[in-house]
Every structure is written in structure tokens, then in C-alpha cells.
Amino acid sequence: MKRLIMNNEKNIIIPKLLIGLGNPETKYDHTRHNIGFEVVDYLANQWGFSWQKSTKFKALFTEGIAPNRQKIRLVKPLTYMNNSGQSVQAILNWYKLAAEDILVIYDDMDLPFGRLRLRLSGSAGGHNGMKSIISHVGGPKFPRFRLGIGKSGGKSATIGHVLGQFSSSEKKVIGELMTLTEDAITSCLKDGVEKAMSLYNQKSISADEQKE
């Protein structure tokens, strides 16, 4: 019985590295595709962490003690979205971490704006940043946190949608979305990703769309 309990405890996945995906130039700030950056920026601000540029990791990097008193590292790859895996692989190699030690935070057009979705593994779902990470870490078995940004008006409008700013109604609730996201991530750090999935995968922040 003791061995079984120990094995169950081993299977609790608690992230050691939070990776927000985005593009580094200022013209991409606060765009839908950069919501991963926005989340880790918010966490760093809330937790009192300061970003440092690391040429070794090709990223902005910071670390400190999270609210659950666990040491945690935050990362913003500066490789541009499509090459995010280069930065992730460099950090995993340096700290001798496994792929399951990361939590990748990124945008998802297949989810409505404001919907949260945690998973322990999965496909890239057409997301180029995730394709790069999966390629560099050797497979899709690592935790990820998707934030819905909603669908574009059609295939031709996809680039404009993901690289565009949030609508006025969405901007009004971004603060609430960041708070909910922090709660979900804190739950991951405290009780593991699987427990957080059961608590937060049905939660969302909605915005009443307005015609602009």
C-alpha cells in the first residue's frame, strides 16, 4: 500500500518552469498572439519578479518564490513564436529539467475568448510555437495552458486576427482574465496540473462583443 501511495504522489505534475509564448517586438505588444507573454508579465509583476535578458537562453528570464513558496522560473522566448522550442530546449538542458516540468502558456483560436484549458499533453493544434517546442523537446508530453482568443472571420483574416489587438469589449475584461489565470496557475503549483484542470477547465471570462 505504501508503494502505491508513493507512486500516486509521483504522478502529481507540478510545473517548475512557466513559459509564455509570443513575439518580442513592441509592435506585437498586447496582441492576441502574445497573450502568453502578457500572462507571465502579469505573474512577474504580481509576484515581484524582475526580468533579465539571457543570451544563453535566447529569452527574457526571471525566477523567485511563488505564492505557494515553491521556487519558480518564468520565461519569455525572444526567438519569435515559430522558433520557441530553441529557447525552451536551452533552458531544460541547462537546469536538467524534464519536459513534464514545464507549463507552456499560449493563445488558442479554437477556444472562445476568455476560456481556459489546461492539459497534460496534446498536439500542437496548428500553433507554430507549440510545433517548435514539441520538435525540440522530443514529443508532446508536457503540460500546456491555452487561453481562448476566439476565431477570425475566415482563413484570409486569421493573421490579422491573431496579430491584432483585442476588441474594446475584450480589453475591459483582460484584468479579470489575468486574475483568473493567476488563480489557475497558482493551483497548478500548489496541487498539480491535473487538480487544476478539474477546477478551472470549465471557467471563463466573457466579453459582450460590440461592433466597432
Image: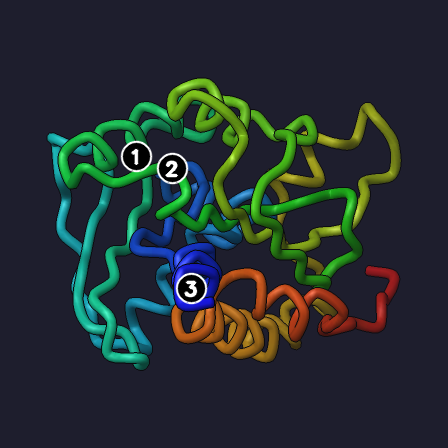
Residue nearer the viewer, 102 or 27? 102
Q: Going 44% across and 50% down the picture, which residue do you hit?
A: 103
Query: Callout 2 environment at 10 Å: few (<14), some (14 to 19), or many (20+)?
Result: many
Q: Is residue 147 above or below residue 126?
A: below
Q: Is residue 118 above or below residue 120?
A: below
Residue at the extreme front: 1
Q: Earlier in the sequence, mark 3 or mark 1?
A: 3
Circle 3/circle 1 CB separation < 8 Å: no
Query: Callout 1 environment at 10 Å: few (<14), some (14 to 19), or many (20+)?
Result: many
Residue nearer the viewer, 212 or 195? 195
Q: Position of residue 187 (x, y in %)?
A: 48, 74
User: Which of the two discs, 2 and 1, sits closer to the camera?
Assistant: 2
Circle 2/circle 3 CB separation < 8 Å: no
Q: Amino acid at mark 1?
A: Leu
Q: Going 20% across and 49% down the picture, which residue do you hit?
A: 61
Residue nearer the viewer, 67 or 77? 67
Task: Report which residue position mark 2 lands on.
Answer: 99
Q: Amino acid at mark 3?
A: Glu
Task: Report which residue position mark 1 lands on.
Answer: 78
Say which element carries label 2: helix
Rendered-image quadrant of the C terminus: bottom right
Q: Which mark is residue 9?
A: 3
Say which element carries label 1: loop
